[in-house]
Structures are given as structure tokens and as C-alpha cells.
Amino acid sequence: MSEFAIETTNLTKRFGDVIAVDNLNLKIPYREIFGLLGPNGAGKTTTLNMLCTILKQSSGKALVDRHDIDKEPDAVRKSIGIVFQDPSIDDRLTGRENLEIHAALYGVTLADGKKRIENVLALVELEDKADKLMRTYSGGMRRRLELARGLLHYPKILFLDEPTIGLDPQTREHIWKYIKELIHREKITVVLTTHYLEEADELCDKIGIIDYGRIVALDTPEKLKRRIGGDVITAEVSNPKQLAVELKKHDPTLTLAFTEKIIRVTIPEGEKYIPHIVHAATSLGANVDSISVKKPTLNDVFLAYTGHEIREETGKAMGTMSMVHRRRIK
């Protein structure tokens, strides 16, 4: 029996001459939060729609909770919950009424449904608002109710398409808390798409970056960040050119650049290299006015792997910094 909640083999979707998803191969273990990131039009929503049986694939195959999306679509639908990007709750009903309708549609028994509704309302902290009309709910409360609805029929896998879009930062963090709690209490797999890269960094066990319908990077957030380079140490010193010469003397492979007042060094585990910079500057009689370390972010990873242009301060070891464009990582 497969250990994977989702497994795709050369999953492909064409719209005429356009290949929206191109031979996608994924293996997502049970009880993992998996993030699918990519620019607009990269194939994220098309992928989710195929896995949710909303859209039929052109070729390839996929197993969702060990069910074939082509041969067993009903079994797939019973195994999954979905929170769509666009709101899909009737605001003329109360929160409880929305949940009762969803329970009936999924065949949850009346007795079990009542208990289950109370459980999911407690999980998203909406017990006291359950009998209020949806039109009185804030955006964050609506999103939390949609999370509750997606869990109502005991799904094994929950698909979240931009679950916090349009919410303020504080509400987004509250939603993050609920999503983490889902994994702990409900023991489910979550597949998440988002444009908030800090959200993916905070939540996801593993991330796949999709571009032009293909997965161009797949790993944990930390490993992805380590792939694109080291930390950037920025020091304000009185003689950056001399310091650059001294540092290169000890390590010719060092990546660095400088201006009249600033030197920047790119190196793994930057914190460990700071004492060396300070010692080298002191030996030259230079003053170090400030020094800081910036670690690579998921935003850096995203821009690198999707080929978007970003400006990065680089330059020759013994020259003034110039502005160049990052090349797409192959």
C-alpha cells in the first residue's frame, strides 16, 4: 500500500496548443503540509483542479489517497476537502446552516454531523458565532468557517487554494495557527497554494515551485534557501577596498563586493564568518561601524527558480559593485 497521500506520474493538461501542466511527477507523504508555489499562469490551480477531479487530465495519472483520479473520482472526492480561492459560502445562511448543508451533501449522518459540526466550530473558534448570519462575519471568520467546512466529512487530504488571500497580517497568522492545528488534531495532509511566501515558509514541510507547468524545484524551505547561495554579510568599514584585498588573500574563492564605505561578503553560515571580518579589519587599523547578516529568503528562491529578474548587488572582487540580473537556475 502506498505511503503517499498524493502520487502523480507524468500528469499533463493541455488546452489546445497550450501545455498548462507538463509531465508533473509528485510524491506527497501523508500528514505533510505541501506548498505549491509559482507565478500566475504557472499551472498551480490547474494541478489542483485535476487532483480534485474538477478537471480531467490530458495524459498521465494521479493517485489521491490511493484512489485513481480517472477511474475512482467519487472515492477521491470523499477523501478530500477543498477551500477555494474565491469565497463559496452562502451569506444568507448562518454558519451552522452552511455546515449542515455540507454535511448532508457528503452523506454525514444527522447524529454524527451534529457532533462533527460542534467539533470543527470549536477548532476554528467560531462556536459563539455559529448561529449568526454569514453576512455579519468578517473576512477572517468566513475563511475559518470554510476551513471548518472542508474538514466536516473527515477528509484525508485538504486542498487550500490561497487560503489567506485578502486577509490582514494578524488574521493570516491566526489562520496559520488553525492550519497547524489541523495536522495535529485531524491527522490530515494539506496541499497549499499561496502567493505569500512567508506563509509557505512558516507552514510547509516541503515546497514545490512550478513554472511553465513543470516542477523546477522541490525540497524543504530551508534546503531550498541554502541552494541559492550563502548568507550576505554587510559591513560598513573605513577602508573596504583594503579589507577586500585582505579577505581575498586568505580565501581567493570568496564572493565579495564593495563601495566606498560598504563591503558585502556572501558565504554559508555567515554568523561564523563575522569574527574573521572584524579581526581582519582590526589588523588593518580599520573601523567597523556596523555589521549585519541577511539570510536567503523564500522570495529569493522563488525569483531565482522562476526566472524573474531581480537586481542583485555583485561585482568583481576588486571593483565597484555593479547591478546585474540573476540568471534562471537550470
Image (tube, rainbow, N blue to C red):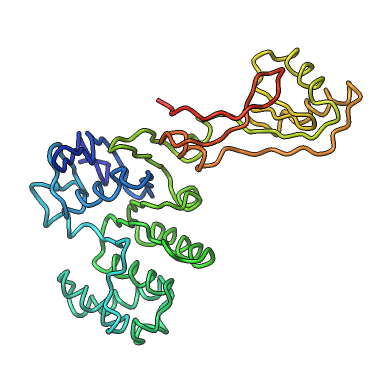
Residue shown at the point (19%, 44%) measured from the top left: 63
* Residue drawn at point x = 20 percent, y = 34 percent: 10
Q: 243 and 219: which one is in front?
A: 243
* Residue that appears at 72% across and 28% down: 273
Q: Position of residue 114 (x, y in %)?
A: 26, 80
In this rendering, would 8 be left or right of 199? Answer: left
The image quarter in which residue 151 lies: bottom left
Q: Nearer the viewer, residue 8 or 286?
A: 286
Residue 161 on image: x %, y %: 33, 56
Task: From this view, report whether residue 140 is shown above or below residue 114.
Answer: above
The total of numbered circles placed on residues is 0
User: Outermost residue, right direction?
Assistant: 285
Residue 231 in the figure: left or right of residue 6: right
Q: Is residue 70 above or below residue 82?
A: above
Side of 63 relative to 265 (left or right): left
Q: Quadrant of residue 258?
A: top right
Q: Is residue 144 left or right of residue 259?
A: left
Q: Position of residue 187 (x, y in %)?
A: 35, 56
- State the residue at coordinates (80%, 22%): 243
State whether residue 270 is above or below residue 132: above
The quadrant of the rendering that contains the N terminus is top left
Residue 316 in percent (x, y) is at 65, 19
Q: Does residue 23 sit above or below 5 in this rendering? A: above
